[in-house]
Amino acid sequence: MLLYDKGYPLKYASISVYQKSHLMSLSQLSPDLLDQRPDLLPNHKQLLALPERIIQFGTGVLLRGLPDYFVNKANQQGIFNGRIVVVKSTSTGGTDAFAEQQNVFSHSIRGIDNGKQIDEIVLNTAISRTLSAATSWEAILECARNPEIKIAISNTTEVGIQLTDDNLFASPPTSFPGKLTAYLFERYKTFNGSAESGMIIIPTELIVGNGNKLREIVLEQAERNNLGKAFTEWVEFNNEFCNSLVDRIVPGKPDADTISELTERQGFQDNLLIASEVYSLWAIEGNEKVAAALSFAPADKGVVIAPNIDLFRELKLRLLNGTHTLASGLCYLHGLDTVRESMENPETADYIANVMLKELAPAIPYEIEPGVAEAFGNQVLDRFRNPFIRHQLIDITVQYTAKMKMRNIPTLLNHYKTSETAPELFARGFAAFLQFMKPVLHQGEIYYGDRNGQQYPIRCDAAAYFDEKWKNATSAHDLASTVMADADLWGTDLTLLPGFEDAVKKYM
């Protein structure tokens, strides 16, 4: 790949340190400039002129670093030839950065693959437009009327796929499932409910059976809003809701040092720059119809379309994500800031390896050969040690409570099917979670915790719940007992698990 400083091509391997004043911005990539610098974006005219074939709900780095990466790679190979309309569903932030850069962004990929060090930068042109649901709802509905847009992708975090009382005729509906139902209804009306107008819908939210759950909510929303039996039958029989799993470590915005380093190497500034590890997996549960529609899949071995993806899901959800959830608060309160730092600290590195391999792996609530789980776990530990990825622990704690419930409580319950002894390491991580969720300050809608005099945001929908519980608790032990006994919060009373309550209190 060729990179530029003031328009002069330099081979990637020979790039030296640049002065920032010499760097152009990626927002300057106007069509005229791209015409003058074709090597900066090979085949840019063809790539930027490809038709829109996917609608994506979510602008986050995970979607840009995985599904959008696969689509871009396929377009470069000429085997999909379609672009993505991105919908920004949240009310915070805007779409200006995307518009300024014509939705083009840089993707730094670094790590070890089969013993070989990978360090490359890809310029992604897969996104055609980025629309705000709050201000461009009619433009989004216009996409529903486009016969070529037959695929929908989403990532709205674990709390995004929830049934709420939603008005589907609002502009826009409040929830993501509400928006999707309204979008499908518009498509149904436009094409008179034809079988050919059905869509392939792939949620990537990290919940078990995400496609099945989203389908159920869409059908319930349709019934609540009286959209008619014919529409619900069209949704049910002509649209494919695919369970899927995404697996790639794509941290939030890179830190200042990484941004500076990559900016100097590229020779231009990019406000949408993302970084990821090399490993990538998008496992999609689907049939031949799904495989035919997702014609970008052959571009990369990381896209797997199979009749059943339970094994992929359980390994990733319980070992990688489950370990992240149990360790993030503990390591953060230990004074560390990133996963990499946690793997460089002997105490926390030992905790991470042991809780994953000795407690979580044997208790995965799915029949998995021990050797398979151990091999996957060791691979995950290598990924955690990636020297190029600075995955912020504070980012992993977003929606901490929902993640703990979804990723770890099923494993905890399965542990007790074969053991009467409390999992000590799990208890330690759970105690750290409870301590992390202790607000000391409330400003507006944001709650803050305290780490040795340093305030940190508690970005979790349960923050107000924990604020009340901590204020009413007579001690940390009292807090632990109260929260653990809340069956409405966890789906079960955790104090009934032999020895678990005492183990958690010991670590509080």
Image (tube, rainbow, N blue to C red):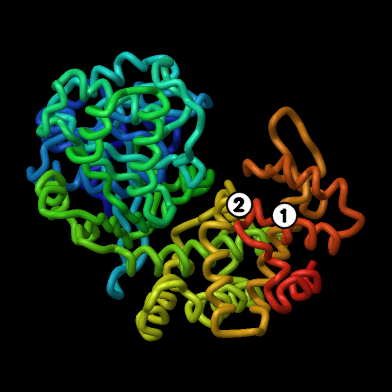
Comes first in the chain, label 1 or label 2:
2
Residue drawn at point x = 36 percent, y = 29 percent: 222
- For label 2, the residue is 400
Task: Locate the C terminus and report the quarter of the image it occupies.
Answer: bottom right
Residue 191 percent location from the top left of the image: 14, 22
Name the spot of residue 217 as percent of width and height, x first. 40, 39
On the rendered structure, is 103 left or right of 225?
Answer: left
The residue closer to the viewer here, 438 or 473, is 473
The residue that label 1 is drawn on is 436
Q: Is residue 414 visible?
A: yes
Residue visible at 21% across and 39% down in the picture: 239
Between 162 and 476, the one nearer to me in the picture: 162
Quadrant of res 139: top left
Q: Are marks 1 and 2 in contact (CB under 8 Å)?
A: yes
Residue 327 coordinates in the image, percent (x, y): 61, 65
Residue at screen point 21% across, 47% down: 1
Residue type pointed to by label 1: Phe
